[in-house]
Image (cartoon, rainbow, N blue to C red):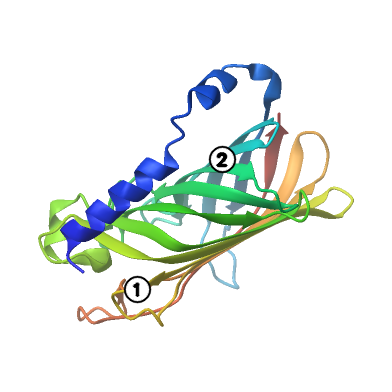
Amino acid sequence: MKTTNLLKSAACLLVFLIPASPLFSQSIQDTTYWTTSGQATLNFSQVSLSNWVSGGNSSVSGIGNFDFNALYQKGRLQWDNTLKTGYGLMKEGEKQVVKNEDKLEINSKLGIETNIEKLLYSSFINFQTQFAPGYKYPNTTDKISDFLAPAYLTLAAGLDYQPSESFSLFFTPLSAKFTFVTDESLSNAGAFGVEPGEQVRAELGATAKTEYKATVLPNVDLSTSLSLFSNYFNNPQNIDVDWDVTLNMKINDYLSANFSTNLIYDHDVLIPIDDQGNTGRRIQLKQVLGVGFSYKF
């Protein structure tokens, strides 16, 4: 399917997604039905070596995260909004400072209860990108990523099954996914699945997303989300996967430990696999373990 046709389909979907009801507009002005929460964390690690016969390098790293959630509930209406951000730097020995964490994600999901218990008509918007340029270190001349390069926008409308406050399962046979590469050099190279010279790739397909949150042990919270996307018009059997798992362990009111993993597979994204310029399809995996300051509100 041509990009223009996909854009038209997505525009129609977006019209459905935008809540234009006057009743809704009046309702969201009432703060009585809003519940907000958030968490800010700052994790550090440091290794200092002097005349250490076993070898190794001194290093220091820090990662900051800020998450915010705003939930609106009134009658049959439910509107859940989340912001997830993170940024981190690391320096090892005499080497240059490098980035070890960089994320910006915004989610908004609107649901209206159906006549079937625990089932909602639902629509959601997901946007993901990063804050700063990324490099394949030690090369800091040629960028491999940047702000809005890539950026991912997913629009979807379907059914959301919520048997409890901890679990939800969303499915739609009609969703639109856009990949943006606004950096000229990356766009010209056809990075992240866009056609060389193009800045946008549009896909139409099916989306499934499941979320689970629970307190698994005293002072230990688990949250996980799994998103799946199949492009109807280009190898629909190759499913895009985005899976997050986070464990937050509270030590006291201001100290905490956390562990997170993020697994991504996108069939359209080719990963550099050597220094000769060869690329291939690979599973992307990130793991972060940190201990530091934490503040919940």
In this image, 74 relative to 152: left or right?
Answer: right
Q: Is residue 260 visible?
A: yes
Rendered residue at 48%/22% (across/down):
22
Circle 2: residue type: Thr
Residue 106 location, x and y as percent? 48, 43
Label 1: how many Cα within 10 Å (few below 14, some 14–19, many 20+): some
Tag nearer the camera, 1 or 2:
1
Local SS, label 2: strand
Q: Is residue 286 visible?
A: no
Q: Which mark is residue 232?
A: 1
Position of residue 134 relative to residue 19, above or below, is below
Residue 138, image quadrant: bottom left
Which residue of the protein is positioned furthest toward the front in this rendering? 115
Residue 24 location, x and y as percent? 54, 26
Of residue 276 and residue 210, the one placed in the foreground of this image is: 210
Q: Which mark is residue 97?
A: none
Residue 200, image quadrant: bottom left
Q: Which residue is mark 2?
A: 82
